[in-house]
């Protein structure tokens, strides 16, 4: 697969200086220099807030960018994907965030400079390869794309709680949100339709994966493959909080799916409904349930 039709335009770069708590901020000049070795002009997109990032990426693509590169974590990648999904503009993620699940799952090096070198080489050679994305649509017609995993259970509820909290700051806020929601945890009734086949169940955790990992390396959907045209659905049934706490560490190895109360499915289209749940895609707040999620084969061209 070649990217020659887009390489005449500049390589647009979305950079999140606060990604990974800013630990890679000083690397940005080196990353831009490394990208320039691809032989195309490199344009750093002007972004002053995360809310602007998506619009700026869309504008860059509309203005003829030959490629789009995202420097940051899964949240930065998620915003960039909204601009390039379903287009022939190639994309490269440089993992520089707290969680870099999508970039690592699709084969980019964990080291940002090494990832930039891979992208530059692909630009220079006019090379890209296609991978799948997931497209979700809400009842009001709102559409979002994601690359890694959609969370629509306990993890999404914890994220929603943490985002509402003003204290404490930093990682301890998320830890406190976990404790609060564990105390309140109860199974919820989910209505799923997998390629049109109904599958209703009580559950505490539901994930729909295009890729295996979320949350910084947790293999929630361990068998998900972003090139197979399918979504992997993992559901933890009506377990109690003690069982959830005991099983959750196993997610890092992907062995949680062996638990008798964890169920795995695979489908091209997943309809998912439950009351009072706001989903989180690639770790970002997304659409309220119900949603319809579809695997879209070859929706993204990666600079690899």
Image: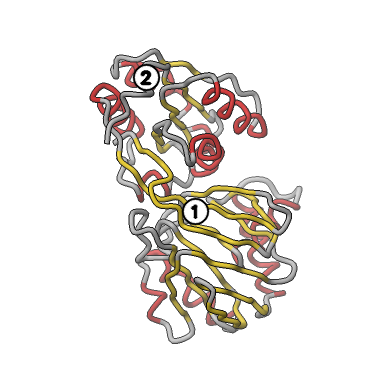
The residue depicted at 49 percent of the width and 77 percent of the height is: 246
The residue depicted at 47 percent of the width and 80 percent of the height is: 262
The residue depicted at 67 percent of the width and 54 percent of the height is: 287
Residue 180, percent from left and from top: 70, 67
Q: Is residue 257 left or right of residue 180?
A: left
Residue 50, percent from left and from top: 63, 33
- Disc nearest the viewer among 2 and 1: 1
Q: Is residue 158 left or right of residue 77?
A: right
Residue 51, percent from left and from top: 67, 34
Secondary structure category for the residue under label 2: helix
| Mark 2 and mark 1: Cα distance apart in space | 32 Å
In this view of the protein, which residue sits in the foreground, 211 or 271? Answer: 271
Q: Which mark is residue 150?
A: none
The residue depicted at 30 percent of the width and 45 percent of the height is: 107
Q: Is residue 190 above or below residue 79?
A: below
In this view of the protein, which residue sits in the foreground, 143 or 116? Answer: 143
Q: Which residue is mark 2?
A: 30
- Quarter of the image for the N terminus: give it: top left
Dot 2 or dot 1, earlier in sequence: 2
Question: Can you name the residue that lies furthest to the bottom here?
Answer: 260
Q: Is residue 142 above or below residue 96?
A: below
């Amino acid at each position: 697969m070649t990217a020659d039709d887009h390489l005449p335009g500049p390589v647009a770069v979305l950079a999140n200086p606060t990604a990974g708590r800013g630990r890679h901020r000083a690397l940005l000049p080196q990353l831009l220099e490394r990208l320039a070795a691809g032989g195309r002009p490199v344009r750093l997109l002007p972004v002053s807030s995360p809310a602007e990032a998506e619009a700026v990426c869309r504008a860059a693509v509309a203005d003829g960018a030959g490629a789009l590169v995202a420097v940051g974590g899964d949240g930065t990648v998620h915003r960039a994907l909204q601009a390039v999904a379903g287009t022939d503009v190639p994309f490269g993620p440089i993992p520089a965030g707290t969680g870099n699940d999508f970039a690592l799952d699709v084969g980019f090096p964990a080291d940002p400079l090494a990832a930039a070198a891979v992208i530059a080489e692909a630009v220079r050679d006019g090379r890209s390869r296609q991978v799948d994305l997931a497209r979700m649509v809400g009842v009001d017609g709102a559409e979002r794309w994601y690359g890694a995993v959609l969370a629509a259970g306990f993890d999404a509820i914890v994220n929603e709680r943490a985002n509402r909290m003003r204290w404490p700051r930093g990682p301890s806020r998320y830890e406190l949100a976990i404790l609060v929601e564990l105390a309140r945890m109860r199974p919820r009734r989910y209505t799923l339709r997998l390629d049109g086949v109904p599958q209703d169940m009580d559950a505490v955790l539901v994930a729909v994966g295009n890729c295996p990992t979320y949350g910084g390396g947790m293999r929630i959907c361990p068998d998900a493959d972003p090139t197979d045209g399918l979504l992997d659905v993992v559901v933890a049934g009506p377990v109690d909080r003690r069982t959830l706490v005991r099983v959750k560490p196993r997610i890092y190895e992907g062995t949680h799916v062996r638990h008798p109360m964890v169920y795995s499915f695979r489908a091209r289209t997943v309809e998912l409904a439950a009351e009072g749940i706001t989903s989180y895609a690639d770790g970002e707040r997304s659409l309220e349930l119900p949603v319809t999620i579809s695997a879209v084969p070859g929706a993204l061209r990666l600079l690899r």
